[in-house]
Every structure is written in C-alpha cells, then in structure tokens.
Amino acid sequence: MQVVTETDPDLPPLERLSAGLDRYLEYVETPRARLRHRAARGIGSDPEVAAIVEDVRAAMAGRILDDLPLKGPPRPAVRIAVRGWVGFAEAASLEWLERRSSRATSCATCSSRR
C-alpha cells in the first residue's frame, strides 16, 4: 500500500496530502483491499497483521511529518496530532466504503480542501 499511495515529491505539501488521500481511497475501493479491511477487523489481534498495519500507519505519518514546514524535529504534540489524523483518515475511509459518498468529498473532508 505504501507504493500505491506514494505521491509526487515536487507537489506542494497540501497537494501531496490530497493526492495521497485520493490514492489511498482508490486503493481501499478495490475488491482485494475491501476484503483485507474487513478481514483485518476480525484478526486485528494477530501480531503479524498488527505489525503490517502499524508499518503502513507509521509510513503515512512519516510522509506528512516530512512535508511539514518545521524548524527542527517535530515536537511530541505534533507527532501525536499527525498520528491521530492518520487514525481519523483510516476510520473515515472505512465509513466512506460503507456509505459511498464521492471520493472527492471524502478527500476534501480529510484534508479540509473544499
């Protein structure tokens, strides 16, 4: 999934965020990914599955942190906020799968681009 959601590093940060969200939702929309998401709900306590999910979350958070215009390493509060946002985006994508609003609307909701 990390390769699928990779974006153009030359884009401005907010555009990278939106492009990454769109690619993530495009991935989640595939039948194989839907099956994985549904299966992961039931086997989330499996250590191997949990490690894979954590790696993806950490990579997503890392991309966002790398794009922030910070002077120096991010403070703990910034890291917490970004990790929280990753969880929000994940939960929002599952809701999107169930309710099927437009992908553009879901991306805008998660990135505050309206």
Image: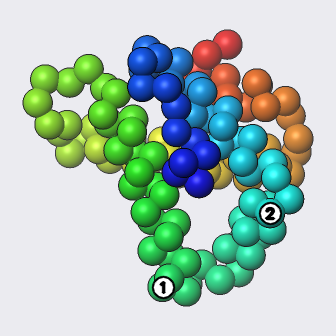
Reading the image, the residue beneath label 1 is: 47
Frontmost residue, 91 versus 9: 9
Reading the image, the residue beneath label 2 is: 32
Tell me which residue sits at (48%, 42%) in the image: 85
Circle 1: element type: helix
Name the mark nearer the viewer: 1 or 2.
Answer: 2
Q: Residue type at mark 2?
A: Arg
Q: Position of residue 76 (x, y in %)?
A: 20, 45
Q: Residues within 10 Å of mark 1 (few under 14, many from 20)?
A: few
Tell me which residue sits at (41%, 51%) in the image: 59
Asked if marks 1 and 2 touch (Cβ < 8 Å), the reply is no
Tell me which residue sits at (31%, 26%) in the image: 68
Vertical placement of 50 versus 56: above or below? below
| Residue 106 visible in the shown view | yes
Furthest residue toward bottom: 46
Frontmost residue, 87 versus 55: 55
Residue 106 in the figure: left or right of residue 76: right
Q: Position of residue 75 (x, y in %)?
A: 17, 39
Mark 1–mark 2 Cα distance, whole angstroms, equals: 21 Å
Q: Position of residue 2 (x, y in %)?
A: 52, 51
Residue 48 in the figure: left or right of residue 28: left
Q: Residue type at mark 1?
A: Pro
Tell me which residue sits at (39%, 55%) in the image: 58
**Mark closest to the chain's N terminus, 1 or 2:** 2
Residue 59 in the figure: left or right of residue 52: left
Q: Residues within 10 Å of mark 2 (few under 14, many from 20)?
A: few
Q: Which corner quadrant of the image does residue 113 belong to?
A: top right
Residue 29 in the figure: left or right of residue 106: right
